[in-house]
Image (tube, rainbow, N blue to C red):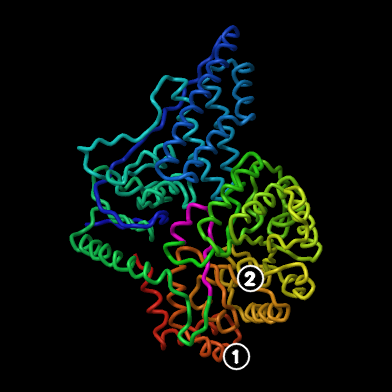
């Protein structure tokens, strides 16, 4: 009898094959004391091991760049920063000098301190760095102990398999060969981890965050993997295998259909042209966005450059990341959102005081304006990237004109520093409408912006006083609450009056019912997560704007979001639009 398990789908695709459990961890280092006379020798051993580990990383980065590309190669830069981190070096030396520990034990103790600091954060981007930290541990300790570098060895005579582990380090993932590794399953990890980035680049399906259920997957058993949904079937039945094979065949057909549709405009049945762009969390998602027909990038989240990092990202690092996205979409808009840090997203290089309510505290543009070094690096990188394409700059969590004025002052200063003519147009600046204050004062904010992007996620929680992450009030968090629908309509009116380009980038743009409502209210540009992009494009092609405008106008007195959903759902069911749109992305 088969066993169904679920994790988080991280790299799309399907696989069927035998399981191979892997482990590359170096065991815990015993507590070893040294004599005072041996201190200098141990410190020298530590520095030699660091140098050797860095040399390995440089070689690995070159190999990865040649195999997968420049951005994937940069995965190992973060590990190099960890090895060269002054706190790690000084802390290890202190353990050797003050506690008379061997270099191995001192390094292990210092890494444990850093791991505890990371574990205090619940943010996924910080947790992603734990795999890098384990990789650094294995690399340096193997140099100290004279062991070979951690890796994944599979001979050509071995049967291709699905690798299973608690977690997979990037240095191991990059050694995976798609003809030998059919899939990757881990108990820990997130969709944004470096190992997942590599798996996606290699086209290997991956499921992460399986948790303790991983113990139920025996070595050598047959495993069926769905890297999109995160479903795993242990020892599938003949019927389930047959279903899997049918799904693979259907997937090939759908991929062909998507490729044909990707280049076609997204128009409604009554001829209204819309634009559907992509929300990107990291540059490695570029290829998937292009494959799905994204008409540009409506939201490039830049937090991947800072969360989990121990120092402010350099201008060059940011420029390389932004340029890689911009050059992938020639002639298309690429909207770079300035750092939206704060709330649950603080980088390690910032010393933050505990806030009673961080979502109403020091975050987003408030942080950037107070941290000029952080902000200037980002602005300089974005302005330079604009030389390579159509860059726009989006400012989050704005509540006053002063924040936009000060942002523009920073931008003018950036133009001057880069030798560009101030006031000559430059990079368009946009306002992310996600606070009630921004909605109420759009007429006052309009003179300072070139475009507007509606952020439905934060706006919903601020309008309804319902924390979107709190399960006790989850039923209150409804982006289709009548109060919000009225605000969405007012934003359309204000943007039309002030001739501002308008888009919507919140999660509501990935909800078929939400998109139908937004079309009826006058929205024509959407930025959507990759998991929903093709579905939304196909759905729009089966909707009538004239019908939706009449539907919204005729039901303006709905008393709840549930009422709104029911009415729109009935329309979608009656027209068959939702069914047609929903079939595109299965598998």
| Residue nearer the viewer, 173 or 63 | 63
The label number, if any, that marks residue 553 in the structure image: 1
User: Quadrant location of residue 107?
Assistant: top right
Q: Position of residue 149 (x, y in %)?
A: 40, 28
| Quadrant placement of the N terminus | bottom left
- Direction from residue 136 to residue 208 in the image, left or right: left
Q: Is residue 519 magenta?
A: no
User: Quadrant location of residue 332?
Assistant: bottom right
**Mark 1 surroundings within 10 Å by alpha-carbon count, few (fewer than 14), some (14 through 19), many (20 or more):** few
Q: Position of residue 373 (x, y in %)?
A: 73, 45
Q: Which residues are magenta?
A: 275-289
Dot 2 or dot 1, earlier in sequence:
2
Residue at x 60% of width, y 53% of height = 302
Name the residue at the left extreme: 238
| Quadrant placement of the C terminus | bottom left
In the rendered view, tell whether residue 398 sits above or below residue 346. below
């Amino acid at each position: 009898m088969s066993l169904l398990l679920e994790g988080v789908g991280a790299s799309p695709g399907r696989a069927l094959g035998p399981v191979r459990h892997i482990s590359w961890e170096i065991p815990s280092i015993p507590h070893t004391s040294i004599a005072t006379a041996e201190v200098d020798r141990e410190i020298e051993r530590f520095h030699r091991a660091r140098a050797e580990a860095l040399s390995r990383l440089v070689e690995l980065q070159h190999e990865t760049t040649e195999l997968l590309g420049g951005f994937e190669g940069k995965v190992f830069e973060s590990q190099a920063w960890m090895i060269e981190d002054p706190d790690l070096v000084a802390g290890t030396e202190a353990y050797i000098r003050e506690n008379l520990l061997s270099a191995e034990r001192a390094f292990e103790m210092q890494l444990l301190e850093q791991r505890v600091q990371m574990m205090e954060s619940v943010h996924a981007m910080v947790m992603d760095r734990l795999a890098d930290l384990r990789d650094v541990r294995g690399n340096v300790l193997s140099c100290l102990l004279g062991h070979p570098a951690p890796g994944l060895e599979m001979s050509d005579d071995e049967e291709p398999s699905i690798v299973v582990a608690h977690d997979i380090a990037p240095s191991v993932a990059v050694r995976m060969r798609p003809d030998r590794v059919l899939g990757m399953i881990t108990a820990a990890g997130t969709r944004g981890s470096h190992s997942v980035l590599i798996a996606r680049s290699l086209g290997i399906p991956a499921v992460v965050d399986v948790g303790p259920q991983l113990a139920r997957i025996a070595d050598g058993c047959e495993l069926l993997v769905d890297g999109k949904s995160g479903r795993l079937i242990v020892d599938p039945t003949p019927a389930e295998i047959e279903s899997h094979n049918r799904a693979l065949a259907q997937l090939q057909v759908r991929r062909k259909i998507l490729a044909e549709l990707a280049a076609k405009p997204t128009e409604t049945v009554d001829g209204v042209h819309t634009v559907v762009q992509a929300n990107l969390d990291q540059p490695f998602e570029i290829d998937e966005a292009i494959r799905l027909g994204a008409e540009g990038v409506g939201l490039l989240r830049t937090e991947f450059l800072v969360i989990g990092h121990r120092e402010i990202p350099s201008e060059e690092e940011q420029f390389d990341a932004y340029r890689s996205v911009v050059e992938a979409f020639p002639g298309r808009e690429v909207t770079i959102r300035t750092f939206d840090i704060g709330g649950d997203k603080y980088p390690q290089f910032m010393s933050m005081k505990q806030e009673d309510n961080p979502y109403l505290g020091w975050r987003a543009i408030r942080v950037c304006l107070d941290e000029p070094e952080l902000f200037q690096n980002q602005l300089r990188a974005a302005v330079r990237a604009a030389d390579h394409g159509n860059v726009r700059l989006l400012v989050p969590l704005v509540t006053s004109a002063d924040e936009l004025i000060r942002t523009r002052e920073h931008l003018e200063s950036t133009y001057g520093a880069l030798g560009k003519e101030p006031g000559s147009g430059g990079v368009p600046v946009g306002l992310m409408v996600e606070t009630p204050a921004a909605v109420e004062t759009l007429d006052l904010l309009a003179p300072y912006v070139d475009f507007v992007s509606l952020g439905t996620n934060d706006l919903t929680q601020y309008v309804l006083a319902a924390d979107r992450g709190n399960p006790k009030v989850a039923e209150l968090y409804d982006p289709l609450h009548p109060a919000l629908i009225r605000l969405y309509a007012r934003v359309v009116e204000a943007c039309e009056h002030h001739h501002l380009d308008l888009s919507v980038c919140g999660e509501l743009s990935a909800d078929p019912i939400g998109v139908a409502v937004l079309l009826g209210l006058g929205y024509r540009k959407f930025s959507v997560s990759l998991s929903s992009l093709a579905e939304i494009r196909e759905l729009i092609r089966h909707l009538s704007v004239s019908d939706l405008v009449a539907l919204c106008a005729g039901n303006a007195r709905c008393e709840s979001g549930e009422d709104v959903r029911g009415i729109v759902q009935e329309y979608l069911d009656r027209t068959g639009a939702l069914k047609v749109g929903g079939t595109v992305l299965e598998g």
